[in-house]
Image: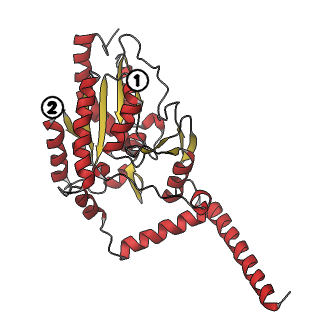
Amino acid sequence: MGATLKTGLLIVCVTLVSLLALEGLTRLFLDDGMLYELEMWKYATEVKERDLRPDIGHRHRPNAHAELMRQDVRTDEHGFRSPPVPDKPDAGVARIAFVGDSIAMGWGVAEKETFANKVVADLQASGRRVDGFNMGVGNYNTTQELALFRDVGANLKPDIIVIAYFINDAEPMPQYDDNTWLDEHSAAWVVFRYRTDSLFRQFGEAPDWKHYYRGLYDPKAQGWQQTQAALADFAKEARKIDAGLIVYNIPELRELKPYPFQDITDRVRGVVEKQGVPFVDLLPSVENLDPKSLWVTVPDPHPNGKAEVTFAKAMLPQLTAMLDKLCRERGKGCAGQ
């Protein structure tokens, strides 16, 4: 064997050993169950699955189970993060469908603390005959939420549809690139790629988070145009299945007072109310609190359990009024029966 070949083989062997060591060290020292990029990677590989329909793109796998951000995440037979419900609600039971993205799903939050779970539990504790299900899926926009609701949610006969709207719901449809072997299997590669992208965003020409969100609402932005159409179609869908519809605006939690996106909230409100649908801004429920006290972690401003419980309490008055109407008109969702 020539000296050049031996040197080449040695380099290959040392490289492989080094990469294996790096992978092991990443999993041993960095994967503490709270590192955002690794937990999102686990979410993508253990809970999500591709759906090739262009208006859905991805969804939760049925009966999936993973530990994410040190929280137990399970899905039911439909891929919902909520206790299973029968195909049709029992007589007299009002059913609530919660629609949204990772905030509705409850990223970094125990299932019992998600606002979907808390709202139903609090209503039941007050004597209301209700059940519900949580259709939240991470990285969804309003178009995807509508498509998933049409595919699965409508068949479960909800009486009330709750849309949890977040400012990034106006994003265009995600791009689904083919994953490499490293994307699927290497924690070290995931961390390296995420940190490299972060550096490019920090020192490159990528817009900061405020400019990014504002860019989504340019009148000509494709995602915003699709979102307006999806909100209008949600109203039509609700009328078609004879369900009530309400939109709750979830505030961006990095800055609360003064809130930098009130004009965008007002723009979304105008689109929703044009359809005759009630719109409730949940900013007042948290605006006087320390923003960081509401985050899952300091680098990750998803709403934590405290925030989700606060949102749930703020949702109750409008939902109670809707249930009162259902009780009078259809004998559903009544209290004390």
The quadrant the N terminus occupies is bottom right
Asked where in the image residue 276 lies, by quadrant, the reply is top left
The reply to whether dot 1 and dot 2 touch (C-beta < 8 Å) is no
Front residue (pair 120, 94): 94
Horizontal and vertical percent for residue 271? 16, 42
Horizontal and vertical percent for residue 84? 49, 26
Horizontal and vertical percent for residue 266? 15, 47
Asked where in the image residue 216 lies, by quadrant, the reply is bottom left
Question: Farthest residue in the bottom direction?
Answer: 3
Q: What residue is shown at x 70% (from left), y 68% (from top)?
A: 20
Earlier-in-chain disc, 1 versus 2:
1
- Residue type, mark 1 in image: Leu
Question: Farthest residue in the front direction?
Answer: 53
Q: SS at mark 1?
A: helix
Q: What residue is shown at x 54% (from left), y 35% (from top)?
A: 62
The residues bearing labels 1 and 2 have C-alpha atoms spaced at a distance of 24 Å
Q: SS at mark 2?
A: loop
Marking on residue 297:
none
Marking on residue 276:
2
- Residue type, mark 2 in image: Gly
Marking on residue 156:
1
Residue 287 seen in render: no
Residue 322 seen in render: yes
The image shows a total of numbered marks equal to 2
The quadrant the C terminus occupies is top left
Residue 272 higher or lower than 327, as above or below: below
Q: Residues within 10 Å of mark 2 (few under 14, many from 20)?
A: few
Question: Farthest residue in the right direction?
Answer: 1
Residue 328 higher or lower than 37, as above or below: above
Front residue (pair 149, 177): 177
Relative to 44, is 252 on the left or the right? left
Horizontal and vertical percent for residue 259? 21, 54
